[in-house]
Image: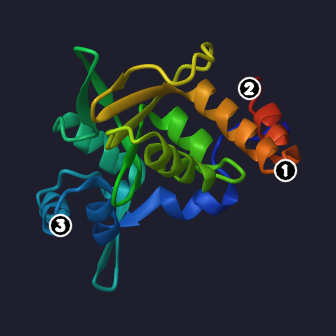
């Protein structure tokens, strides 16, 4: 019985992101390396989710995120327009801004995006040119609304994923970049902007 492979947003290059060393996990999730080692020693990870290679522990990313969620340590909460907004992934951290993704879906789309380096550049340049005071950019999982730059509030700025994708494409067109890869990627995911 032939079975079609399950569709996924992960590409081959991301296979290395499925397993992290304790050091990589510490940098990615802002939890001390020794804390991950203690959790391993205390049996908080299932045996199938960890492996020791020499002196280095490898842990499945999904297991890390599951444990962090259970300990209420996964992601971060910001106040936007008087409401608490919980985000899961730090997508970019620079000297002047941080870009947070609401969930795995946003993270996977933006991290696999052709020309993904345009995302932080776009926000860095706009911040400098507009003299806006934001330090945090939140990209939510809204693919329906193209109302782009909503909730411009002090240091936190929330945007829709659709608005970000539209802006990246417009920016590419203005700079006369070839948008065919970008368009193909969105079509592959059944996203229209």
Q: Is residue 161 above or below residue 30?
A: above
User: x, y percentage for residue 133?
Assistant: 32, 39
Disc 3, SS: helix
The structure residue drawn at horizontal position 35% and vertical position 37%, both measured from the top left corner, is: 88
The structure residue drawn at horizontal position 88% and vertical position 45%, both measured from the top left corner, is: 180
The structure residue drawn at horizontal position 49% and vertical position 56%, both measured from the top left corner, is: 18
Q: Is residue 3 visible?
A: no
Residue identifier under label 3: 37
Q: Is residue 142 left or right of residue 152?
A: right
- Local packing at callout 3 (Cα closer than 10 Å; few below 14, some 14-19, many 20+) is some
The structure residue drawn at horizontal position 58% and vertical position 16%, both measured from the top left corner, is: 147
Q: Using the numbered discs, state the Cα–Cα distance from disc 2 to disc 3 in whole angstroms.
A: 41 Å
Q: Using the numbered discs, state the Cα–Cα distance from disc 2 to disc 1 in whole angstroms.
A: 22 Å
User: x, y percentage for residue 57?
Assistant: 31, 72
Residue identifier under label 1: 176
Residue 191 disc label: 2
Q: Are marks 2 and 3 in contact (CB under 8 Å)?
A: no
Disc 2, SS: loop
Q: Earlier in the sequence, mark 2 or mark 1?
A: 1
- Local packing at callout 1 (Cα closer than 10 Å; few below 14, some 14-19, many 20+) is few
User: x, y percentage for residue 178?
Assistant: 87, 51
Q: Are marks 3 and 1 in contact (CB under 8 Å)?
A: no
Q: Earlier in the sequence, mark 3 or mark 1?
A: 3
- Which quadrant does the N terminus fall into? top right
Q: Is residue 57 left or right of residue 99?
A: left
Q: Is residue 79 visible?
A: yes
């Amino acid at each position: 019985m032939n079975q079609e492979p399950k569709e996924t947003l992960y590409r081959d290059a991301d296979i290395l992101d499925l397993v992290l060393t304790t050091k990589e996990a510490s940098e990615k999730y802002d939890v001390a390396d020794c804390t991950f080692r203690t959790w391993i020693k205390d049996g908080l990870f299932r045996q199938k989710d960890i492996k020791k290679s020499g002196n280095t522990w490898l842990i499945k990313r999904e297991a890390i995120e599951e444990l962090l969620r259970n300990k209420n340590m996964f992601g971060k909460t910001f106040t936007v327009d008087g409401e608490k907004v919980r985000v899961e992934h730090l997508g970019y951290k620079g000297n002047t801004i941080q870009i947070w993704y609401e969930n795995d879906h946003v993270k996977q789309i933006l991290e696999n995006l052709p020309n993904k380096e345009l995302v932080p550049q776009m926000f860095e340049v706009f911040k400098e040119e507009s003299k806006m005071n934001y330090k945090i950019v939140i990209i939510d999982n809204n693919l329906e609304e193209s109302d782009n730059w909503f909730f411009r509030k002090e240091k936190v700025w929330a945007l829709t994923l659709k608005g970000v994708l539209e802006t990246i494409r417009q920016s590419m067109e203005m700079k006369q970049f070839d948008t065919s890869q970008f368009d193909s990627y969105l079509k592959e995911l059944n996203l229209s902007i």
